[in-house]
Image (cartoon, rainbow, N blue to C red):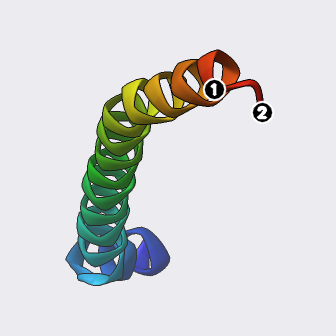
């Protein structure tokens, strides 16, 4: 019974959960940013490809 009481009073569990939530938010932010940059640059590369093809390269 003492082990359960110590576990419930310990702050290690909530701290680990907080770090996990922060890491999940950071990961989601990184994924969204990379996707947005990829979408933005995709049009640029397609335009360059078209112009190079028209120029005969």
Element type where label 1 sits in the image: helix
Q: Nearer the viewer, residue 17 or 5?
A: 17
Element type where label 2 sits in the image: loop
Q: How packed is label 2: few (under 14 Cα within 10 Å), some, or many (20 or more)?
A: few
Q: Whole-Å distance between the Cαs marked 1 and 2?
A: 6 Å
Residue 37 point in image, percent of width and height = 34, 44
| Cβ atoms at labels 1 and 2 below 8 Å apart | yes
Q: Residue at x 30, y 36 (%)?
A: 36
Q: Which residue is mark 1?
A: 55
Residue 20 point in image, percent of width and height = 37, 62
Residue 41 point in image, percent of width and height = 39, 39
The quarter of the displayed image where residue 15 is located: bottom left
Relative vertical location of residue 31 with respect to residue 53 in this rendering, above or below: below
Q: Nearer the viewer, residue 25 or 42?
A: 42
Give the total number of marks visible in the rendering: 2
Give the quarter of the figure containing the C terminus. top right
Residue 47 circle label: none
Q: Is residue 29 left or right of residue 27?
A: left
Residue 40 point in image, percent of width and height = 31, 34
Q: Which residue is mark 2?
A: 57
Q: Nearer the viewer, residue 55 or 23?
A: 55
Q: Residue at x 39, y 34 (%)?
A: 44
Give the quarter of the figure containing the N terminus. bottom left
Q: Residue at x 26, y 50 (%)?
A: 29
């Amino acid at each position: 019974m003492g082990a359960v009481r110590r576990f419930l009073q310990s702050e290690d569990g909530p701290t680990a959960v907080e770090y996990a939530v922060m890491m999940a938010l950071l990961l989601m932010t990184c994924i969204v940013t990379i996707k947005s940059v990829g979408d933005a640059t995709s049009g640029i590369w397609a335009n360059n490809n078209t112009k190079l093809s028209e120029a005969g390269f």
